[in-house]
Image (cartoon, rainbow, N blue to C red):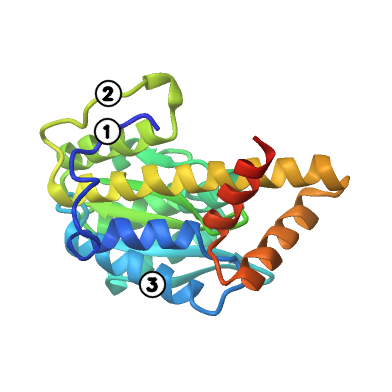
Amino acid sequence: MAMQWSGATEPRESRPLARCLIDLADTPDDAAGVQAQLVTVALLVADRVEATDYASITTPGVGGYTTVAASSELARTVDEAQYDSDAGPCLDSVDTGTPVAVPDIRTAMRWPGFREQALAMGLRASLSIPLFAGSGTTLAALNLYGRDHTSMGVLIDAVLSVFDDRNGDEPLPPALDDGGRELVAGLVEAHAIRATIQRAIGVTMGRENCTAEQAYRRLRASAAAAGATLRETATGLLAERR
């Protein structure tokens, strides 16, 4: 991945946010604990990432978008302004599976409902990050809202680099706080897990002449039968192929 993180070898309990993102990427989409993991991510981001004053999680559904977790009612209110107008960075992030950054909310003319509500709440910058579980399909957006656009700008640049392989292995900016580094570390490792699982799905598709969804379900069934994680099963499958 694009960014390096010097704390990647720290114990599991010392970086709960990173661990939660990593575990989510290795969890089947339909597992009972996925929604609880999403709630935990939102609360940990708000607690541990200094640049972020508020955080929430947006998920799509049959009846539209829903905020399934929020660190405060303020975050929920800003989310709902986007749902009401059917436009906003959190919706775009879910729909495209890419991060959507708003370094300066005053310039967000394309989303007037979001812009007016966010500014009224004293927010100055936001970042929506797509989240995924084992299948690799975007299942939610993690929304970060901040009052300080300078510190949010540093965080935005670091997170966007995780999604941009063209940047190479650049060090994290010194101005990024420890919580921001933990967030980036979790995203980097989650993407590595997704890449491994997707490679295994591709191998299964070619070997068994099936669709990506069928290949994922077979990988999931194999993992369950072996009492292993999706990553462990995918890694074993790739090792057999080699």
Residue at position x 63%, y 42% in the image: 238
Res 45 visible: yes
The image shows residue 188, relative to residue 131, as above or below, that is: above
Q: What label sits on residue 170 in the rendered view?
A: 2
| Element on which disc 3 rests | helix
The image shows residue 175, relative to residue 47, as above or below, that is: above
Q: Please provide percent x and percent y for residue 169.
A: 32, 24
Binning the other alpha carbons within 10 Å of mark 3 as few (below 14), some (14 to 19) or many (20 upward) gives some
Task: Choose the circle earlier in sequence order: 1 or 2.
Answer: 1
Q: What's the residue type where badge 1 is placed?
A: Gln
Task: Choose the circle earlier in sequence order: 3 or 1.
Answer: 1
Circle 1 is placed at which residue position?
Answer: 4
Q: Quadrant of the N terminus?
A: top left
Q: Quadrant of the C terminus?
A: top right
Left/right of residue 155 with respect to residue 212 in the rendered view: left
Q: In 3D space, how far apart are the residues under numbered discs 3 and 1 (Cα atoms)? A: 26 Å
Circle 1/circle 2 CB separation < 8 Å: yes
Q: What label sits on residue 39 in the rendered view?
A: 3
Q: Please provide percent x and percent y for residue 109.
A: 42, 38
Q: What's the residue type where badge 3 is placed?
A: Val
Q: Quadrant of residue 122?
A: bottom left
Q: In 3D space, how far apart are the residues under numbered discs 3 and 2 (Cα atoms)? A: 31 Å
Q: Between residues 14 and 80, which one lies in front from this camera angle?
A: 14
